[in-house]
Amino acid sequence: MKRFAIVLICFVVQIGYAQLLDSVSLSELTMYKSLQKANKVSPDSVYRLTVFFKKEKNLGEALIKFTNLQELRIKSVKLKEIPPQVFELKQLVILEVSNCQLIEIPNQIAKLSNLTHLILSRNYLVNLPSAFKYLKKLEYLDIWSNSIVVFPDEMAELKETLRIVDMRVIYMNDLRKEELQKLLPNTKFYFSQSCDCH
């Protein structure tokens, strides 16, 4: 009877909170490549999801039920902003929102404190919020092909964890590059060729 009770308690705890997986374990799980496919299984069993060319206006509402999501990729979806419901998916380790016409990242990004990889390539971003300083586990940031040339000073708080920043196809001069490298001296930056510009 005791053994049964212990097993039952462990089972309840496991249901209540999904353990964060390491990158290898996560990559071995099924990647659902559409909401339609993900909706055919229990929402609790969906850890990885990619959404392409989604025209549904209520994308955030469609995503919020996948509470165990640890990898979410939104690609080529017309969005001006990340749906606020995404910031309630607190298990996220990898978030990609690429080629989506984003114009800003709100401070709610700070809620995703487990993020290690953030991919925001091919959008219309011109800056990053100071709330990035709360992404203490962030290792990889891809802002390829945006218009960001300056980071908030608060980003310096990520100097121990942020290993790689991809800033290719962003045109800036050598001075801007030097400023970024001073802010994050332990980070490897990938830049395009310097230009005689801002």
Image: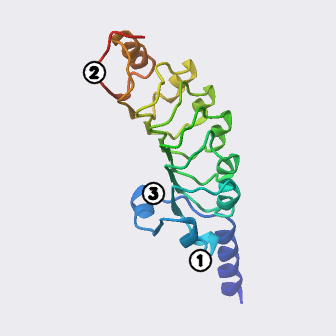
Of the two numbered discs 3 and 1 in the rendering, the one whose residue sits closer to the viewer: 1
Which one is nearer the viewer's eye here, 153 or 80?
80
Q: Tell me which numbered mark, 3 or 1, is placed earlier along the sequence.
A: 3
Q: Is residue 132 above or below residue 27?
A: above
Q: Is residue 33 above or below residue 90?
A: below
Which one is nearer the viewer's eye here, 139 or 94?
94
Q: Tell me which numbered mark, 2 or 1, is placed earlier along the sequence.
A: 1
Drawn side of residue 151 relative to residue 6, left or right: left
Q: Is residue 198 above or below residue 17?
A: above
Element under disc 3? loop
Q: Could you give the CA–CA distance between mark 3 and mark 1, rounded to whole angstroms?
A: 26 Å
Element under disc 2? loop
Q: Which mark is residue 40?
A: 1
Pointer 1: residues within 10 angstroms few (<14), some, or many (20+)?
Answer: few
Name the residue that disc number 2 marks: 193
Q: Quadrant of the C terminus?
A: top left
Q: Is residue 38 above or below residue 171?
A: below
Q: Could you give the CA–CA distance between mark 2 and mark 3, rounded to whole angstroms?
A: 35 Å
Q: Could you give the CA–CA distance between mark 2 and mark 1, rounded to whole angstroms?
A: 47 Å
Name the residue that disc number 3 marks: 22
User: Residue at left 56%, top 57%?
Assistant: 54
Q: Position of residue 17 (x, y in %)?
A: 65, 63
Q: Quadrant of the N terminus?
A: bottom right
Name the quadrant containing residue 38: bottom right
